[in-house]
Image (tube, grey):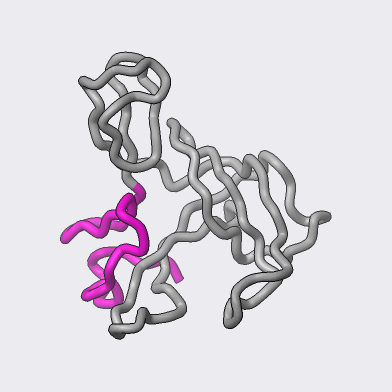
Amino acid sequence: MPLNAEDSETAGLLPVVPFLKIPDEGSPYLEGSRCTQCDTTFLGERSVCAKCGSREGLEPLALANHGELYVYSIVYRSFPGIEVPYVSAIVDLEGGGTVKGNLINIDPDPEKIKMGMPVDVIYEKAPRKDAEGNEYLTYYFQPKS
């Protein structure tokens, strides 16, 4: 079930990656950087624009929670303890930003997964704790409902 920062379920959770933000108020989001010189959007914090080379004018922004499936791979072999098969995906978000993650809530069947299909970004508590017992908030993609 998707989580909001207002939910007590997000209290104490750590972001699984630095570009996943959990604000005190409002919903979790993926953060990107937009170049004010060429209007290109990137995932995460940037100090230099990879498109135009500008070192000025990169500003943070919340990325969209909707996009299109760019490419995917069905993974059948993984580390011990990781359930397979699962769908590893790259998604182009509306408004800019490209993100890698897992596509869930769909059978890992090439007949059911289509390039360009609309997807949503959802946020959930990660299924495992780390060695110190910390719990994390993670993100997934799912077919647009």
Q: Residue at x 72, y 60 (%)?
A: 74
Q: Is residue 114 above or below residue 48?
A: below
Furthest residue to the left?
A: 24
Closer to us: 135 or 24: 135
Image quadrant occupied by the C terminus: bottom right
**Which stretch is magenta?**
1-30
* Residue 21 percent location from the top left of the image: 27, 54
In the drawing, does residue 7 fall left or right of residue 100? left
Hey, which quadrant is residue 123 in on the image?
A: bottom left
* Residue 102 percent location from the top left of the image: 57, 59
Closer to us: 145 or 51: 51
- Residue 5 lies in the magenta-colored region: yes
In the drawing, does residue 127 fall left or right of residue 27? right
Image quadrant occupied by the N terminus: bottom left
Q: Residue at x 31, y 34 (%)?
A: 33
Q: Residue at x 57, y 49 (%)?
A: 119
Mainly helix, strand or loop, the magenta region? loop
Q: How many marks?
A: 0
* Residue 52 percent location from the top left of the image: 38, 15
* Residue 16 percent location from the top left of the image: 36, 64
Q: Residue at x 49, y 39 (%)?
A: 98
In the drawing, does residue 131 fall left or right of residue 94? left
- Residue 91 lies in the magenta-colored region: no
Q: Is residue 80 above or below residue 72?
A: below
Furthest residue to the right?
A: 111
